[in-house]
Image (spheres, helix red, strand yellow):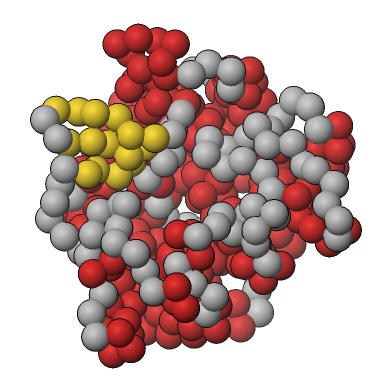
């Protein structure tokens, strides 16, 4: 989503485009699982007491997407501002783009998820969190870089201190607390409810961290690669140490299982909603290591398609959801005669029970979706690289 924020004419860090493209493609796998596997109606794929290794890993690998995306969005803002744009211009851009994303989350993206116009249910998902994080960042960018980093790290490291607080503790402000640091339904007006999936506090911190790390883009490449690698390695080691202690840093302690493989999976099953300290360290540590590996003068041609997706992430996002949804409807209608569960707000009508163990179908739909979207994304990336129309910055 950083592409939404910055001029397509800027000099690009190809490593950032590739990393963003990788997480976009992985994200599509998670959403393919949502539409082509009904495991979530029967068990949580991360719950080691019920899942299989294949389902766990299919869900777990997608945990890397949202934090990497939010961090790179903040970094993209810094790269835009570093080209001499006044902070007032950058702040106005952040507010307008952020509110635009929130509007799209509640309208277009919501319809893509549920294929109906029953707006009594609104969803506050990842686009919602990115949008409001941009609005918050519009004020944060006026702080000194050191202060921004301290604020970001305080939110990431310290927000688990708030885990004991519950929305009901805040009385009439219960809904506000759910939006900031909880999950669940928030009544708005009449029968309209907001389903909060991505609370804001941790995600604002992750995006602010990306902005605060922006000055590293000016380091000499060799020094930058080494330092980014060491930071990623340090974060990964910190995750292992903190998670091993099984105390602070995650709402869900890991537990020993009869099978050592599932004990290891329990160790990896960190809380994403809201993202715990362990979750952020587990995902961003390896992401930094990969970013260091990609930071080189030239990259192999075989990974260039990821750079294409990374240059037009918003287009990819708004197209892949309705495409996967339509594919699921077509397949389910052919197999079962109808697919009412794919047109309903949650809790949806029961899915056929034999739907939910078909990971082969999930992976097949994922690959087909990515292949279909690649030429569209390549075409649009060329447009954004050669034209300066103002409306392109919103796509």
Which image quarter: residue 301? bottom right
Residue at x 23%, y 69% (from the top left corner): 340
Residue at x 86%, y 56% (from the top left corner): 258
Residue at x 77%, y 42% (from the top left corner): 254
Does residue 160 appear anywhere in the picture? Answer: yes
Q: Nearer the viewer, residue 269 or 8?
A: 269
Q: Position of residue 71 (x, y in %)?
A: 54, 43
| Residue 100 versus residue 332 in the image, above or below | above
| Residue 242 versus residue 354 in the image, above or below | above
Q: Position of residue 91 (x, y in %)?
A: 33, 29
What number of labels is visible?
Answer: 0
Q: Is 118 placed left or right of 40 in the picture?
A: left
Q: Position of residue 323 (x, y in %)?
A: 30, 75
Does residue 232 appear anywhere in the picture? Answer: no
Quadrant that contains the C terminus: bottom left
Q: Nearer the viewer, residue 199 or 82?
A: 199
Q: Nearer the viewer, residue 150 or 166?
A: 166
Q: Is 341 placed left or right of 71 in the picture?
A: left
Which image quarter: residue 315? bottom left
Which image quarter: residue 132? top left
Residue at x 40%, y 52% (from the top left corner): 1
| Residue 276 versus residue 337 in the image, above or below | above
Q: Is 111 placed left or right of 36 in the picture?
A: left
Q: Position of residue 303 (x, y in %)?
A: 60, 77
């Amino acid at each position: 989503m950083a592409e939404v924020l910055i001029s397509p004419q800027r000099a690009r860090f190809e490593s950032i485009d590739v990393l963003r493209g990788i997480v976009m493609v992985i994200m599509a796998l998670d959403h393919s699982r949502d539409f082509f596997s009904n495991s979530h109606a029967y068990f949580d794929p991360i719950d080691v007491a019920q899942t299989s290794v294949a389902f766990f890993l299919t869900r777990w690998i997608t945990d890397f997407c949202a934090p990497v995306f939010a961090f790179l969005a903040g970094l993209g803002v810094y790269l835009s501002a570093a080209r001499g744009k006044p902070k007032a211009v950058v702040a106005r851009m952040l507010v307008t783009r952020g509110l635009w994303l929130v509007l799209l989350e509640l309208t277009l993206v919501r319809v893509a998820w549920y294929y109906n116009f029953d707006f009594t249910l609104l969803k506050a998902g990842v686009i919602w969190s990115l949008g409001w994080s941009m609005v918050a960042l519009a004020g944060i960018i006026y702080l000194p870089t050191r202060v921004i980093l301290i604020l970001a790290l305080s939110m990431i490291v310290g927000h688990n201190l708030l885990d004991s607080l519950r929305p009901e503790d805040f009385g009439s402000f219960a809904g506000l607390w759910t939006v900031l640091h909880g999950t669940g339904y928030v009544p708005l007006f009449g029968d309209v409810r907001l389903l909060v999936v991505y609370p804001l506090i941790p995600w604002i911190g992750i995006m602010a961290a990306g902005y605060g790390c922006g000055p590293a883009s000016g380091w000499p490449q060799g020094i930058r690669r080494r330092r980014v690698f060491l930071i990623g390695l340090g974060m990964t080691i910190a995750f292992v140490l903190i998670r091993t202690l099984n105390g602070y840093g995650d709402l869900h302690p890991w537990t020993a299982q009869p099978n050592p493989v599932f004990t290891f999976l329990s160790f990896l099953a960190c809380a994403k909603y809201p993202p715990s300290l362990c979750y952020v360290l587990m995902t961003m540590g390896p992401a930094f290591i990969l970013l260091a590996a990609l930071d080189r003068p030239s990259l192999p041609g075989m990974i260039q398609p990821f750079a294409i997706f990374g240059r037009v992430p918003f287009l990819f996002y708004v197209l892949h959801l309705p495409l996967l949804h339509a594919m699921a409807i077509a397949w389910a209608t052919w197999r079962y005669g109808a697919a009412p569960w794919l047109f309903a707000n949650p809790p949806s009508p029961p899915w056929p029970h034999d739907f939910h163990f078909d990971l082969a179908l999930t992976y097949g739909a994922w690959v087909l979706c990515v292949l279909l979207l690649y030429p569209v994304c390549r075409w649009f990336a060329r447009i954004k690289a050669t034209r300066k129309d103002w409306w392109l910055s919103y796509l």
